[in-house]
Amino acid sequence: MSAMASITAPTTSAPAATDSRLRWGSGIMAVAGLGFVGYAVLFFVRNFTDSFLELGIGHNEVNVGKDEIQAFSPELYDYISHLHIAVSGFIAATGLAVAALAWFGVRRRLMWAWVTAVAAPVLGLAVALPAHYPNDFDTAGHLGLIYADTALFVVGAMLALASLRERSERSAV
């Protein structure tokens, strides 16, 4: 007969019921994370429609469309399509991770969850956004939803952080 070991997860208080800023902030962060998932779905679907190009990118930014790209080079079309699919997957994965970290970690006052939930989209946007400006892909139609969702996320993150810091300062005294 072998002995079985059990591991008990550390418990954290669930102050979300008593701290509306934390509850609202983490909730807003989670909704914004799901907004990233929604954007990824749009990105993915457009790949398989006549639109093909990303949201907000049209003949003013790129002088050819799906049919012209396919006619010019079916391999290039397949390559661009695979990039659309891959990027949408990474955007969706980041959004899902952010939503889960906010809902299940930040709400439990886990500062590491807040830092990770903020760092993930910051890294993604820091890499992706600069490439939009030199080639005039920075249209409101293209980046507007991401900017709006990011602004929403920042509001939530700041609300949650204010609560986390206040609680941290009180317990340090």
Image (spheres, rainbow, N blue to C red):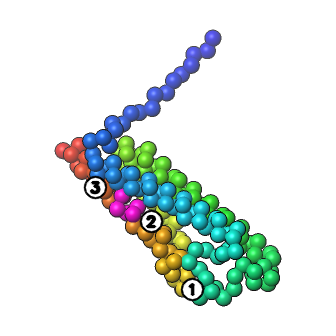
Mark number, residue 24: none
The residue at the point 69 percent across, 82 percent down is 65
Q: Earlier in the sequence, mark 1 or mark 2?
A: 1
Magenta residues, start to end: 152-157
Badge 2 element? helix
Residue type at tag 1: Asn
Is residue 164 shown to the viewer in this render? no
Separation (CA) of disc 2 from disc 3: 20 Å
Q: Residues within 10 Å of mark 1 (few under 14, many from 20)?
A: few
Badge 3 element? helix
Q: Quadrant of the N terminus?
A: top right
Q: Nearer the viewer, residue 6 or 22?
A: 22
Q: Which residue is mark 1?
A: 135
Residue type at tag 2: Asp
Quarter of the image where one finds residue 134: bottom right
Q: Which residue is mark 3?
A: 162
Q: Mark 2 or mark 3: which is in front?
A: 2
Residue 19 image position (x, y, % from top left) = 27, 45
